[in-house]
Image (cartoon, grey):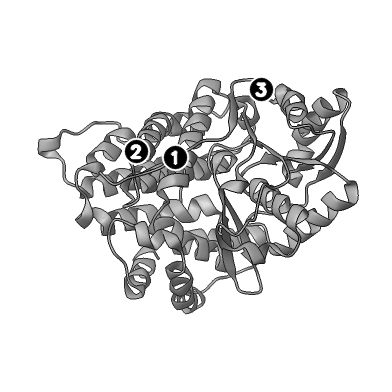
Amino acid sequence: MNSFEFFIPQNIMVGAGTMAKLPECAKKLGGSHAMLISGPTLRRMGIVDRAADYLKEAGMKVDIFTDVEANPSVTTVEKATDAFKEAGADFIVALGGGSPMDVAKAVGVTAKFGGSITEYEGAHKVPGKIVPLIAVPTTAGTGSEVTAFSVITDHSRDYKLTVFSYELLPAYAILDPELLTSAPASVAAACGIDAFIHAEEAYVSTAASPFSDAMAEKAMELIGKNIRRFVARRTDLEAAEAMLTGSLFAGIAFSFARLGNVHAMSHPVSAFFDVPHGVANAVLLPVIAEYNALADHGRYLTIYNYISPIPAFEDEFEPLMLVDAIRELNEDIGIPQDLTTAIRQTAKRKDPAKEVSDEEIESKIDAMADDAMKSGNIAVNPRSSRKQDIVELYHKAL
């Protein structure tokens, strides 16, 4: 067994109605003036104002920033940082999915230490504790409320940069399943499969440990048993809580075991074509699972039995059965079959007249492979990969 270390220096609250504990958490942090970072949809739905009201009723000041887009940019971080400083806030509440969480973490860095978030790209470049942060997820997917990562798009490079530091960990994570009930089925599916992939990649990672395995296995169990049920009916609070908790465990798992080729390859897809992160991951997963099957040493059977409606036994199982089970799960929850379809669907949602040709997609593959190879996740993928392998995997995913 390889040596390993772990710590979870966070306070985590799980349960229906726990968002009401927001003021209690803020007071423990010594906060009196919040900057609430979220997205425009949650503002329209009234969830942002509800969170703000909890804080105001406790005598706290609240400023709100909701200009956060999917795959948030360096520019958005700069705007949010300026808003934080102008408000004179002393703590941050991140409310939403992965995008507000990523922006909030980045603001926590740049508001405290200055400069551009690009200056902190890479591992362990944040010099100390960031602005106190409370994370309240409204999707069961990213696990960002318990991870040490912030992923921000740098449009000047068509590149998704990653800041990795345990200083980014929110002081409090509040997981309230009631906040998930209004998510569209497509969002529930994309976020849910993203959470599953966090656990799956951490589980097969060469950096896995007994600690990360325990988290990853419980995450796969909770998500595998509940994702179809949750996508079918988001008001099912039992399924919603299982998904949130599974996402939490998956986030802890990959914070210590890292990820793999799926995430390394999905980030460039989102950077170049703006495909939602969870969708890009889901489309790539069966392709990467097939590629990694050569390196399997018994873990594929465990994963298979978490997601397949019909369990398999060791004497009858073949690793490629997992690939078929993943494709079946994707189909059940409405994930596009291939990368080309995902790219074109994304373009159409933004501009119904937009056509993305095969040639345009093909023209980006070499650059996407270059960016994927820069990811530290490639190094812990169970099967070694060169750039040419990544190019071929992209082609196979099309």
- Residue 17 image offset from top left, x and y in percent: 67, 20
Q: For residue 18, which numbered disc appears in the image?
A: 3
Contact, mark 1 vs mark 2 (Cβ under 8 Å) = no
Task: Name above or below for residue 82 compared with residue 317.
Answer: below
- Secondary structure of the residue carrying tag 2 is helix
- Secondary structure of the residue carrying tag 1 is loop
Task: Name the front one of labels 3 and 1.
Answer: 1
Relative horizontal placement of residue 203, taking residue 87 as reference (left or right): left
Relative horizontal placement of residue 223, taking residue 115 as reference (left or right): left
Residue drawn at 85 percent across, 52 percent down = 85
Pointer 2 residue: 213
Residue type indicated by callout 2: Asp
Q: Camera-side residue: 72 or 109?
A: 109
Looking at the rendered image, the quarter that the C terminus falls into is: bottom left
Residue drawn at 61 percent across, 47 percent down = 167
Pointer 1 residue: 6
- Residue found farthest to the left: 315
Q: CA distance from mark 1 to mark 2?
A: 12 Å
Earlier sequence position, callout 2 versus callout 3: 3
